[in-house]
Amino acid sequence: MPDAIPDSLFDKSVGIVTPKVEHFSQPLTLRSGRVLNEYDLIYETYGTLNADASNAILICHALSGDHHAAGYHSKDDKKPGWWDTCIGPGKAIDTRRFFVVALNNLGGCAGSTGPTSINPETGKEFGPEFPILAVRDWVNSQARLADVLGIDCWAAVVGGSLGGMQVLRWSIQFPDRVKHAVVIASAPKLSAQNIAFNEVARQAIAKDPDFCGGWYLQHNTLPKTGLMQARMLGHLTYLSDNAMDQKFGRELSDGKLNFSFAPEFQVESYLHYQGEKFSRQFDANTYMLMTKALDYFDPARDHNDDLVACLRQTTCRFLVVSFTTDWRFAPARSEEIVNALMHADKDVSYACIESESGHDAFLLPIPRYLEVFSAYMDSVAEHCGIHKPSSVNGASS
Amino acid sequence: MPDAIPDSLFDKSVGIVTPKVEHFSQPLTLRSGRVLNEYDLIYETYGTLNADASNAILICHALSGDHHAAGYHSKDDKKPGWWDTCIGPGKAIDTRRFFVVALNNLGGCAGSTGPTSINPETGKEFGPEFPILAVRDWVNSQARLADVLGIDCWAAVVGGSLGGMQVLRWSIQFPDRVKHAVVIASAPKLSAQNIAFNEVARQAIAKDPDFCGGWYLQHNTLPKTGLMQARMLGHLTYLSDNAMDQKFGRELSDGKLNFSFAPEFQVESYLHYQGEKFSRQFDANTYMLMTKALDYFDPARDHNDDLVACLRQTTCRFLVVSFTTDWRFAPARSEEIVNALMHADKDVSYACIESESGHDAFLLPIPRYLEVFSAYMDSVAEHCGIHKPSSVNGASS
């Protein structure tokens, strides 16, 4: 098996994991007023839930993420889950002491009910009729999954980017069910510029003739061109100017200018490749939905735009992390959260991590980031009375 | 005439101007190796060329600019030329003492030969067969226009953004024909991120089914959707995050979330409006060409990427201007030019202007900007021995 993962990497992971699907038949009323009468959530778990269910960590995913956050689905997998750098034995979220739950959000395209699922009322795919969701809807559905799993209170809810927004919403909506909130590379709401980028991406998808108003599956087609363009633009905003210059500079694929409109700079070829790959893997209606949830997120709106008042109702401890070259959600956006928490007299730790990698940094094994994250998760364990794993420290805490 | 311009504005302008067209029948060999056998350049002039032709200023336009830089085409015009804030009697480029030439670049769509022109060899529009141009090609064609106008040496060549690149190229390519170079909100070359944004915009156009591989005119259609998306993205990068937040914030057009994919935030409606307007006015093939010229510009490439060596051959004085919140061509990019000029022991003035307006600032009447620009143009006049206008100062210099 030449393409399989080396044992050394596999051994540092949670190993082979198998997703589970939970069906919910209690109707869920959404922020929009619409109702999902029933739905599935697909999820994975890593580690073991302890007797008093005090060691559970919820992972919230970002725009294109899913439930496969760590480990491998088979030994032939070429890549582990999307956050394997942070979740596993001995990692920041140490699966030897924590029980980790990662799910695919409602509206997703990786197994939870979403636009590609069959609408039981029509017998056809939901397609564009799948309701537009708000972050709070995800949190409500995640709370029901917690109920099923017997988790009254999460030791921590953790997420980056759009995942960080879910974490914030958890802390506000279910203060009794969250002990720690880890909000990474996120923001209390999108700026006008953020919204504008999302709208350009949505236009690229919606105006692709193969989008068919969102009914592409019924037309046996896929809006791959639009989705590719949306991803090219998204990807570009995840990277820093410097990182792109270091990675690609002005290098030409052929070593010379071609005076044609085919991609000739390496950065063009790279974005084409990334966009094309994504367009084969992701659902366009899900992309549309996810960007809308980003746009809509603004918990302070219910409090006259007063983020301090909004966060006053929280009771958990917070870790907020930002990255210096992240211009999608710049450190200043994280600092709005931190400042509001401090004004609301909450327990908050903050780290702005030096990195060249832009928004993508939250997925990367940056030593200082892993160090801060691990130290905080140690304090989560201590605060929640969770035993240290015996291979690290034989003594009980 | 309720919609006509008020007299007060008109009187501060160069008044009614009439474009002229010059036909060139001497073949122009382009950077790509291709040859334009003949071509037209449309241009406007403001002010009067003096006896020794020492008071001529060339204005180089940016991506979507044209020859109509100042004044009005009729008293019914709602808006003056695109740089009327800076060109006119008593303005930074004072038409009482300078003779100003503004042209539409080759490949443009406002009257100079470009993709919408008839290719004399085929009798049909050039369309996508119009050659991809480099900045040096524009400069060569502009030099021929200078010859026709009897201008051996420009008192100054002036431009912002892509216009600033033409200015730099003039200073390198025709050191004997430029006394002053004014390079505003520009860069010595695009970064990988800049190129990536251009490529996303080009993809939006090229993948619009109405683009028809660039032959839309022959198919009696226009790739308005793609051009609109390209402009939305471009426009978004011309504004600063702060400026967008101040102008639009998260205001909703209907005052409430609609849970639909129609534009609902005001910033979305604004970008749709701007994009739609542009898509009716601009030629898609020209947009493609102009972005390629931006990508290709890299004068240091011929000097082993040594900008100092490249600029050593210049002999003019320089003014370089940047704007604090311009993230398309950030101050650091202007400072690369300034530093290289200083290392090459050239005469350079530099101002980084405080502004909230992003890249668009170079078109706006920002007091400190106009002050710096005017002061520099005073020194240009003095250095070139140009009389001050009598209404400002009766004495000759």
Image (cartoon, coloured by chain):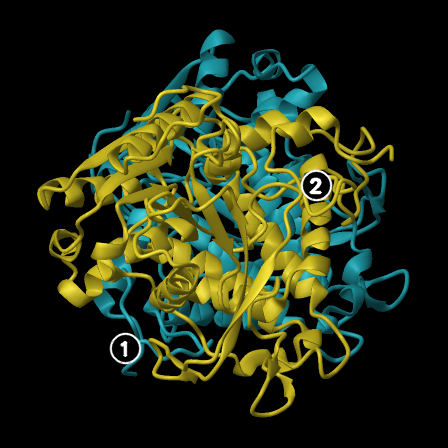
Chain colours: A cyan, B yellow
Q: Secondary structure at mark 2?
A: helix
Quarter of the view holding residue A359: top left
Asked if residue A103 shows in the view, the reply is no
Q: What residue appears at the point 50 percent right and 52 percent down from the top-left corner?
A: B102
Residue A389 position (above or below residue B219): above
Q: Amino acid at mark 2?
A: Tyr
Looking at this view, name the residue that lies furthest to the bottom: B122
Instruction: Where is residue B162? Give x, y as percent.
Output: 42, 53
Name which residue type carries label 1: Lys
Residue drawn at the location 22% of the way across and 29% of the way down: A395
Q: Give yes or no for contact between labels 2 and 1 (Cβ–Cβ under 8 Å).
A: no
Q: Residues within 10 Å of mark 1 (few under 14, many from 20)?
A: few
Q: Quadrant of the C terminus of chain A?
A: top left
Which residue has dot 1 on it? A256
Number of marks drawn:
2
Q: Position of residue A95 (x, y in %)?
A: 36, 45
Q: Is residue B16 above or below residue A179?
A: below
Left or right: A208, with B344 as reference point: right
Q: Position of residue B320 (x, y in %)?
A: 30, 38
Question: Does label 1 lie on the same chain as label 2?
Answer: no
> From mark 2 to mark 1, how far is it between C-alphas?
39 Å
Q: Secondary structure at mark 1?
A: loop
In this view, the residue in front, B261 or A7, is B261
Q: Position of residue B47 (x, y in %)?
A: 50, 41
Label 1 marks a residue whose chain is A
Q: Which mark is residue B270?
A: 2
Dividing the image into 4 quarters, which one contains the N terminus of chain A? bottom left
Residue at the spot x=69%, y=22% of the render? A301
Q: Nearer the viewer, residue B247 or A204?
A: B247
Q: Compared to B31, does A207 lie above or below?
A: above
Which residue occupies the foreground of this view, B317 or B359?
B317
